Amino acid sequence: MIKKLAKSIREYKAPSIITMLLMVGEVVIECLIPFITARLVNDIKAGVELTVLLKTGLMLAGLAIVSLCCGGIAAFTCSKASAGFAKNLRHDVFTRIQSFSFHNIDKFSTSSLVTRLTTDITHVQMSYMMIIRTAIRSPLMFAFAIVMAYIMGGSLATTFVVVVPVLITGLLLVARTAMPAFRRVFKKYDRLNESIEENVRAMRVVKGFSREGYETKKFTDAATDICKDFTKAERIVALNGPIMQLCMYFNMIFVLIVGSKLTISSRGTLLDIGQISAMLTYGMQILMSLMMLSMIYVMLTMSMESMKRICEVLDEEPNLHNPENPVYTVADGSVDFDSVNFKYSEFAKRNSLSNIDLHIKSGMTVGVIGGTGSGKSSLVQLIPRLYDVTEGSVKVGGIDVREYDIKTLRDSVAMVLQKNQLFSGTIKENLRWGNENATDEEMIEACRLSQADDFIKSFPDGYDTYIEQGGTNVSGGQKQRLCIARALLKKPKILILDDSTSAVDTKTDAFIRAGFKEYIPETTKIIIAQRISSVQDADMIIVMENGAISAVGNHDELIKSSEIYREVYNQQTNGGDFDE
C-alpha cells in the first residue's frame, strides 16, 4: 500500500530528501547547543576570560541561526513536498476514476469518491508531512539526546530508564484506545457528504415538499455522530498532556535533587551546574521527542484507514480495456446484436437482457419503447461499450465493439440521456463538449435544429450565458435541447436519445426529429421514448418487455401484431381509456 502511494511523490522526491537532511542538521545542532552551554556555564564559574566567553557566545549564536535556517528551509521544502504529493495523488485517483467503466463506478457511491479525493487525501498529506519532517526529527532527537545525556550526566541519566518506559507505555495506551473512534469517523464522513450532496442537488424538491426540517435533522444527526466520535477520541488523546507533564516534572525533580546532591558532595568533580542545566534540557528534548512520536503514531494510524480507502480506488482495475491491436476507424452506423445476454453483475440472479438478436442498418431511425425496467437503457449502453456483454456480441460498422479503440468508438456514438448533465460555464463552452473546434455558425445551426436557438437568443448574453452547476438556471426542456445540440455537433455515426425529449412538448419533439433527417441523414438514430408519437415515423420500432425483444416492426405492423404496442398506442391516443 505504501509503495503504491509512494509512486505519487514523483518530482517531489528532491524537496522530500532535502527536508530530511535539514532535519538531521537541525537535530545535531540542537543537541550540541546544551553541551556547549554547559561548558560555558562551568567556564564562567571558573572565571573564564571575556574573549573566550565572547567566542563561545558567538558560536552559540551562529549555531542557533544555522538551526533556525535549517528549520525554516525545511518548513518550506516540507510543505512543497507534501502539497505536491497530495496534488499528484489526487490526480492519480481522479485519472483512475476517469478510466472506470460504469461497472467499476457502481462499486463506489459518489459521496464516498468525493470523501476519498478530499478528506482522505488531506489526511495522507498531513501524514506525509509528519513522516519527512517530524518522523525524522523525533527519533534522531531522542537518540542524540539520550547519548548526550549520558555523556554529560553519567549515572544521573539513569532517570530516563524509569521515565521513558512509563511515557512510552502511557502514550501507546492512549493512542490505541483512541484509534477505533478515529477509524469509525472516516466511514461516517461518507454519510455526511451524501447528505450534503443529496440536499444540494435536490434543493428544489426539498423546498417543494417543505422538507427542510427533515433534511436539517438528517444532516445534524450525521454531523453529531461524527462529533461524538471525534470528541471521544480527542478526550482520550488529551491524556497525552498530563502523562507528559508527569514524566517531565518527575525528571526535573530527580535531576535537581540528585544532581544537586552529587554536585555538593563531590564539590563539582563528578557533576557541576553546567551538567545539571544540560541534563534538564536533554530531558525536555527526550520527552518532547517521545510526545511527538506518539502524535505521529496517532496520525499514521488515522491515515491508515484513509490510505486503504484511496488504494481501493487505485487498485480497482477497469474491466474495459483496449484490445492489443485496436481498430481506429468506424465504417458506418450499422448496429448488430448477436445472441446477446447481459447482466450488470456476475452475482446477479437474472439477466437484464436476454437473447437479443437485432440488426440495424446504417442511417435508420429506430424507436425503442417498453415499460420501466424492460431493458431499454441497458440495450443502448452496450453500443458505445459502457458495459460489455455477458454473452454474444455487439457490432458497430460490422466489427465487434470490443475490437475498437474505446475513444474511437465513443467518439462515433453520441448519447443524450433524459437526465443529461450540463457543466458550469457558458452555453458555448457546454456545446463545445460535442466538438471543441466548433465554429459559432455550427453551434447556432445545431441549436436551431434542436429547437434551442430561440430561447438562447432570449437570454441577455445569448450564447455567452453562464450555466450554473448542473444547469440549475435553465428548465428541464431547455437543458435537454442543449444536450441534443451538443450531441449534434459531434456529428456521430450513431445518435442515441434515451428518453431525452421527455421534457419538451410534442410539437418541439416533432421539429427536433425533422431536424435530424435534415442535418444527419446518414447517422443511425436510436430513440428511446415513452410517447408513441416520438417513434411513430421510425423505420423500425422495437418493443421490449422484461429484458427481451417482444416485437419488431414499423408502426402499422406493430399495431396489428403487438398487443403491448397497440395497448400503449390506444391509451395515448384515446386519452387513456381502456376496458376495466
Image (cartoon, rainbow, N blue to C red):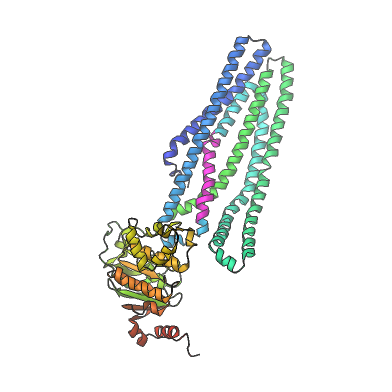
Answer yes or no: is residue 537 visible: yes
In the foreground, 360 or 434: 434
Q: Residue at x 61, y 40 (%)?
A: 294
Based on the displayed image, in which of its 4 quarters is residue 162 positioned?
Answer: top right
In the foreground, 333 or 365: 365
Based on the displayed image, in which of its 4 quarters is residue 146 positioned?
Answer: top right
Residue furthest to the bottom in view is 579
Position of residue 143 relative to residue 576, above or below, is above
Position of residue 6 relative to residue 492, above or below, is above
Q: Residue at x 32, y 78 (%)?
A: 540
Answer yes or no: is residue 406 visible: no
Q: Residue at x 64, y 61 (%)?
A: 217
Position of residue 256 relative to residue 134, above or below, is above
Q: Main secondary structure of the magenta part?
A: helix
288 left or right of 442 in image: right
Residue 110, position as x, y percentages in the image = 50, 59
In the foreground, 559 or 360: 559
Position of residue 78 relative to residue 119, above or below, is above
Residue 129, position as x, y percentages in the image = 53, 39
For the record, the magenta segment spans: 113-136
Residue 368, position as x, y percentages in the image = 38, 76
Residue 476, position as x, y percentages in the image = 47, 68
Q: Is residue 117 magenta?
A: yes
Q: Is residue 192 magenta?
A: no
